Image (cartoon, rainbow, N blue to C red):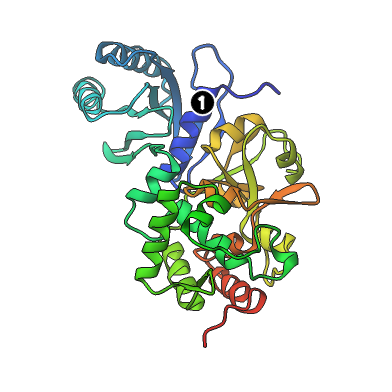
Amino acid sequence: MERKDKSTQLVQSALALALPGCFFEPAAEAENGPKFIAVCPPSKFAVEVDSVIALRTADVLGRFAVAVLEARSREPRDGPLPFVAVILPRLGAKMVRAVHEFLSRNAPEISWALVDPLGGLHANIVRPPLDVLVVERSAPRRPSAERRSASRSTPFSDLNRWMLKILLLRDAPSHRWSGFRGKVKNPTHLSRVAEVSVETAHQFVRTFAERDFIRTDAGDMKLVRKRELLEAWLAEERQASPVRSYVRTIDGGSFDLARLSHSTHVAAVGGFEACRRHGVLHTAPGIPMILAEGPPPALVGEWDLDYCSEREAQVSLVETRHKASVFRGVEKTDGVPVVDLLQAALDVAPMPGRGFEQAELIVEEILSWRAP
């Protein structure tokens, strides 16, 4: 089966993230027909997809005008509702206003969306009788990891997480962590061990020393009050459950996690499946979760997957916000990249059901960071 068009993948990914519970079906093959059907119970939408290269209002409105005419020419009275999506280089408020004014005046019955390559979305979804749902999702910007760690107010920024892992896991059982295990003399030494800038390491030490989580003893920086530190970290995880894309293979075959071992994209097994591969799972794992460095459409395209409902999914994809701390600790288990044990605990902490219980088991019983 031919690989799906990249523009279709991009629009599907943006809609899947912004509209939980929706899934997609192939449209009947026809020249100039809809690209796919979006099923958002109780409604179905026949989605047209177009794109512009230059960010010019006239070009965008022209694409919408043509797509609206085509949608109206074949609109079945009892079939999927028309939906037009245009991909543009960058999503901005001025363009959203222009499209909104144009379509409100000329085609108020048409659902529409603007999507940018990073997954930003503005959609006006029209359901009979002209009930409009407005959905917006900002595209994630990509400043450098070190700039993020300095600018975010939380102490658990990406690089801070990585340095915490180094200081925490060096005392873990040897079969649980193969990373650095020696003494850390000072912030400059930490910067070399963690491969971060000296300034970033010094800021990290100041941040956690002010909270009385770091002390220096006999030329070795150590984390203290580990249990309280982990409780604060897990509490932050529970407040920010990641957005998941649910997918399955296009041809209906099984999904083999061994694909990750030769993928051209950076990705690793996380969550309950990572717990299982570490030998610490104590509940049903559910469908595997894959943490990805980039947006899900890249993996969807490479692996010939299709977006679907959670009930039909074979795997879920999550673009992690903490790329350094997740992927620098990855190791291969049976040839498959798997996150470290602490990361697995962080992954499952916000999950419904027994997620937090699984995280507590890892923290208390496996890594022995018990409350006093």
Q: Position of residue 67 (x, y in %)?
A: 37, 16
Return the residue nearer the eye: 148 or 167. 167
Decide: few, some or many residues near mark 1? Use Cα within 10 Å; few <14, some 14-19, many ≥20: some
Image-quadrant location for residue 308: top right
Q: Position of residue 198 (x, y in %)?
A: 45, 49
Instruction: Tell me what residue is drawn at x 60 percent, y 64 percent.
Output: 342
Helix, strand or loop at mark 1: helix
In the image, 286: left or right of 83? right
In the image, 319: left or right of 50? right
Total marks placed: 1
Instruction: Mark yes or no: residue 313 visible.
Output: no
In the image, 45: left or right of 210? right
Instruction: Tell me what residue is drawn at x 48 percent, y 68 percent.
Output: 234
Q: Residue furthest bottom?
A: 372
Return the residue nearer the eye: 46 or 145. 145
Judging by the rendered image, the residue that carries numbered circle 1 is 8
188 is higher (above) or lower (below) than 217: above
In the image, 170: left or right of 97? right
Return the residue nearer the eye: 200 or 187. 187
Q: Residue furthest right?
A: 334
Return the residue nearer the eye: 48 or 338. 338
Instruction: Mark yes or no: residue 327 visible.
Output: yes
Image-quadrant location for residue 117: top left
1 is higher (above) or lower (below) than 352: above
Instruction: Tell me what residue is drawn at x 46 percent, y 52 percent.
Output: 158
Please state which amino acid type lies under the numbered disc 1.
Thr
Image-quadrant location for residue 361: bottom right
Instruction: Tell me what residue is drawn at x 34 percent, y 28 percent.
Output: 112
Q: In which quadrant of the rendered image does the N terminus lie?
A: top right
Q: Position of residue 153 (x, y in %)?
A: 32, 56
